[in-house]
Amino acid sequence: MELSAQETWSRLLEQARLELSEATMRTWLEPAEPVALDNGCLIVSAPDQFAVEWNESKHAQLLSRLAFQTFGAPLDVVFQVQAERTQRPQMDFFVAPPPTPPSGAARMATPLNHRYTFETFVIGKSNELAAAAAHAVAEAPGKTYNPLFIYGATGLGKTHLMQAIAHALVERNPTSRVVYMGAEQFINEVIESIHGRTMPEFRRRYRSESDIFLVDDVHFLEGKEMTQEEFFHTFNALHESGRQIVVTSDRAPKEIPGLEARLVSRFEWGLVADIGAPDLEHRIAILRKKAAQEHLELTIPDDVLRFIAENMRSSVRELEGCIIKLLLFASLKHREVTVELAREALSDKIQQSQGVLSQLPTAAPTVDRVQEVVARRWGVTPEGLRSKSRTKTVTVPRQVAMFLARDLLGMQLVEIGQAFGGRDHSTVIHSVGKVEHQMRRDRPFRERIELARRELSAP
């Protein structure tokens, strides 16, 4: 079974999200549309020549690499101008008033993924609370669970639920004014408004012209004092007028370092719901749902779906990506989809998954061992990690050691603080958040930590 241009492009976007920021995705790649897939070349249209040149120079090579990793075959991604689209959307949303705006108000159009609806969301034990809350918000926005704060690791469905709320509201009331954006875009808008002296317009747009306010990855507000100030007042204005607020994050409000206490308090006014990793039955259900969506029930046997679910235990995105890679592999090899074929097609992913599992030690290392390994790899002493010194030479490895103590040992914040010279839990939260933030943006730093993790996880 061959994939269409649309299906191929959708899978590439899912993989690109793992390496590019949400702002980049929404600005440059999501506005683009697949045109044709032929002879190892995917042609994609962009709104204008500027977007074409930018995507060609910044993203074409990355997308070709991701295509080979995803589908197991070379694929060139070529951008061209789409004639009927002459304007590039501004970042995460744009104001597009119809010829006769209802009630004189501007209609806010949002770049939502058509796949992210309640109908396509698979509910299991790990996400049932968040899903139920999202349904309640969609049924009665501003009445219950306001705000709704959803948190969890990447690829588990936070954005899916958030966009499902927006889809449901717009379907019920097409004139609803929905603002959906990433926190990074909110930060950029604040900066641009300050420099352009357009803060009154910025505040009016967000505080007066929206019925529901959805912000993804709110943890990016950490340490941004001016942005947090504006977000705080925007939150208050919307909440006091009974309009719905939904935000997502990769951690709970209290665990976001550099977030003002008053924002933490407001995020906890409504409901804080987490999404965890799916268990085996949930993973099988997700794969069956995906197969049904793509009309592949007769193509992929149940034993193959179970095989994938048993061997892939990370994100929902990776589970769904396995199906696409398997189908392409079967098409290229002209073979039926079987467990043996799945084992061959997904060997790299299975080895990676099993490698992570095999790295888990039979007995967890001690915090002393964590300090010893990190100190040696960063060229300091374990005593230095426990000292009161605040020099960068010691501060960075201390933060790394705290992160690994939390990540590998599951230690409580207070316990970690005591193990590192009697520091308080807020210092530990800040340290863990700092490392996570740096790992997302600095690949050599992330790889250095992974080497330390592997040494600590070795049996």
Image (cartoon, grey):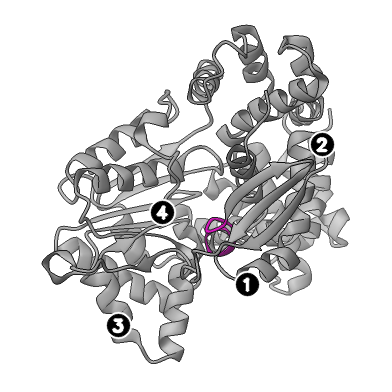
Viewer-proximal residue, 216 or 253? 216
Residue where numbered disc 3 is placed: 201
Amino acid on which disc 3 is placed: Glu
Q: Residue at x 28, y 42 (%)?
A: 168
Q: Please rate how many residues cluster around mark 4, counting C-alpha atoms within 10 Å: few if below 14, some from 14 to 19, many from 20.
A: many
> Which residue sits furthest front?
83
What is the x, y in percent for residue 1? 67, 23
Residue where numbered disc 1 is placed: 49
- Which quadrant, please, contains the C terminus? top right
Amino acid on which disc 2 is placed: Ala
| Circle 1/circle 2 CB separation < 8 Å | no
Amino acid on which disc 1 is placed: Gln
User: First in sequence: mark 1 or mark 2?
Assistant: 1
Residue where numbered disc 4 is placed: 253
| Secondary structure state at the residue bearing disc 3 | helix
Q: Is residue 22 visible?
A: yes
Amino acid on which disc 4 is placed: Pro
Q: Residue at x 46, y 70 (%)?
A: 90
- Circle 2 or circle 3, nearest the eye: 2
| Secondary structure state at the residue bearing disc 1 | helix
* Numbered circle sitting on residue 25: none
Q: Is residue 80 above or below residue 357?
A: below
User: First in sequence: mark 3 or mark 1?
Assistant: 1
Q: Quadrant of residue 227?
A: bottom left
Q: Which residues are magenta?
A: 24-32
Q: Quadrant of residue 71?
A: top right
Residue 37 as seen in the image, left or right of residue 341: left
User: First in sequence: mark 4 or mark 2?
Assistant: 2
- Give the distance between the C-alpha atoms of the residues marked 1 and 4, in whole angstroms: 42 Å
